[in-house]
Amino acid sequence: MSQLIYQFKQAWAGLSKKPGFVSTVVITMGTTLGALLCIVTLAYLLLLKPLPYPEQDNLYKVEHAIGDKSGETNAKAFTYPGLIHLYKNQDVFKQAALVHYGEDVLTSLPNQPTVNTGYITPEWFNLLDTSMVLGRRFELTEALETNNPVAILSYKVWSEEYASDPNILSKKIDFSGISYNVVGVTSKNFVEPQIARTGRLTGVWFPWDYNLDSRMKDRWSNISGALNFVGKLKDGITAIQAEQIITPLVNDTWKEKVSGIAFFAGWNINMELHSFQTVILGDSENTVYLLLAGVFGLVIIACANIANLFMSRTAEQQRQLAIFAALGAKKSHLFKAIFAETSLLMFLSVGLSLIISSFGFYVLQQNLSEILPRVSELSINGITFGVAVFFALVFALLFAGLSRKMINYRALNSLLQSSGKGTGIQVSKRIRQMLIVSQVAIATVLVFANISLFKEAVETITEPTGFSVQNMSELSLSVSAPQMPPMEEVIPVMTELRKKLTELPQVKSVSIAGSPLRGYGLWALTSVKDNVNFTPRSKGVDNIYFDMIGQDLIEGDLFTEADIKDRNRVMIVNDVFAKRLNPEGSALGMQISPGGPENFTIIGVVKGIKMPGSTEIPIRVYTPSNLGSTVMTLNLVENQTISREQVVSVLQQVSGLYAVFGLEDLVQSQKRMLFTQYTTATTTVVLAIITLFLAGVGLYGILSYGTQMRRFELGTRMAIGAKKKHLVGMIIKDNASVIVLGVLLSLVILLGLYISYSTELAAYLGLQLLPMFIFTVLSIAALSLFACYWPLRQYVNHPAIHSLRGSD
């Protein structure tokens, strides 16, 4: 032990004299290892770590897949009565819960925040074994059809909105005109399963009876994506068996209830079970593998660079090592001395890497919580620390081993006898060439991959959508009452509100329509001409909507004020739907049946719009909006904004029955829809720059060392008349073949990846990426030329005598 302590003391004493070397190694390895730890911890969380729920392998989400008469799945959403029928009559789950997700305004607080809400049956918290920091879970007194107005707050809402009030259980909270008694607060460590949408966290939980879809209790033909069924399978029953049992239970009843609706003739319900693991993680596995590939590429480049630094360090220590050898040190003793240095540096790097990985966790949680599942659970844990120690030991042994291989033990004695003249330790030409080839190949693959992803992300961001949301905001209102007032009372209030909003100096106009970015419903329609059924996306709009957002009219007319006022049975369709309705001619004048007594007549065709980040334009229809709509789009004067407080002030002048549910800048909404693309573009640029930087440092170090080994040759050539350009050309020529070999190796790697994952990569690789690859090769070539020239200039820019004397 004393010998080991002595070696570490000696290693520290030696390293303290080389602060530049120490800082370079620690920063390079600490940063790289930090990125590695961050991604490895994420990979463990998503690929290996069980979900934090009891019997997680038996937890399933049930999907209600509706298929039309052609057998194609039309939608995956429950009907309200079908969901209740399944809940009351199923016999395959030992515990089952209903979950409805929504949003509402907390009107009992002065700032009236909009929070995510969840409506559940009591089994939900029991399935998850949810712990409470205050109060209790829901009980049988809050079960289905009990109508008990109680609520449970999330830890976040309790701490942020109520300042962790210890007396919260004695207070009430108001939503939609109903006062709820607070009976519990979930604990801080409760991890909500995100089965509806990644990143969505519920702020307040209510008993099931208070969900808004409960008004559809008898509507077997209506579906809602907010309805969810989850359960824990009984022992001995598989997911396939459960599907086979509950499908006829739901399907037979549904077909009986809709038998009088001709539209649903030949349609069927198929029940599908998906494990919590599958629902929550989605396709994140592919993302994790891509992240791992990228970070391991950076690790390899960093290791090559640090290996070169250690080789140079070993060359500098040749006289000290020669003294050790002369005093009887064996090869193993020399290895231990070098290992002491590499260990110290690697464990210093571990400290830095843990700090960087913690920062990485924070960045992921703040920016990618809606893209990557379970990121809220990221933290430094035993896996993180264990991986850090493992890689530190591996790298310490690796760098010590490489340095040890450089040592010619026999040459050390002759070096001491010759008073240190010449070079006793050298990195062989073959090793230097291998390092150059690996640097160039890895850098080329990583830079090409990042540039390709960057190109795809930018193309998606800049792709025309067919509409504009500049200077627009969407305003949505909620009713502070248990029931919506009659429409004859709502219309004059909304009309007066729109008038007062238009009078604001920053508002140009107000459309009785929601944002073009969302708010589309699914509508079952039939073409009267040929009795073909369609389920297009639908939206109610007014007479100024299309002009406001810049959506082009192709043929026919837009709605008039009379169409909106009288709710005329007219319809505007997009060109995609028009082609489906009448491939050979015009869709104008065609009759569309919604299943009621009155048909709609198509009066106009508009250009189809594409949602940001989408690849297809779905079929869409537009009908005259309701004058009592509580959702509207504000068109603002250029460079002007409107605040929530201003809207609240105007609203209170008109009516106290309504609250501002949301006020959202549509440009920001559009950017959020493209968040993945913006993140990809930013990340790939950063990774490409880091890769080029690391490759540049590595190539410079290797070529600088090689040039240093040839300084006497360079001095001799200059002494006999060699020109500067000849020497530069000679060095470039000597290294060109190795650089080309690295590029060829990168091609082999890319081809291997394409062959191995042709299905997954087919959409990303093609001839259109050839310019990207050429640009990548030219970038690496320019970097290599710089790395060849820059270390050479210290010799060719001085008289030959400097190189012959070994002076700089």
Image (tube, grey):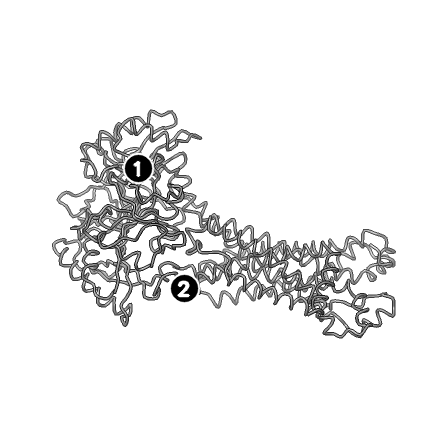
Q: Is residue 366 left or right of residue 148?
A: right
Residue 37 visible somewhere in the drawing:
yes
Q: Is residue 82 left or right of residue 355?
A: left
Where residue 386 sits: x, y (%)? 54, 64
Which kind of residue does numbered mark 1 sit on? Thr
State the CA–CA distance, disc 2 to disc 1: 39 Å
Q: Residues within 10 Å of mark 1 (few under 14, many from 20)?
A: many
- Between 575 and 740, the one nearer to me in the picture: 740
Where residue 258 sits: x, y (%)? 15, 55
Which kind of residue does numbered mark 2 sit on? Pro
Q: Is residue 623 above or below residue 305?
A: above
What residue is disc 2 on?
A: 50
Q: Residue at x 23, y 51 (%)?
A: 142
SS of the residue under disc 1? loop
- Between 594 and 240, the one nearer to me in the picture: 240
What residue is disc 1 on?
A: 107
- Kindly identify which numbered label has been placed on residue 57: none
Q: Earlier in the sequence, mark 2 or mark 1?
A: 2
SS of the residue under disc 2? loop
Q: Residues within 10 Å of mark 2 (few under 14, many from 20)?
A: some
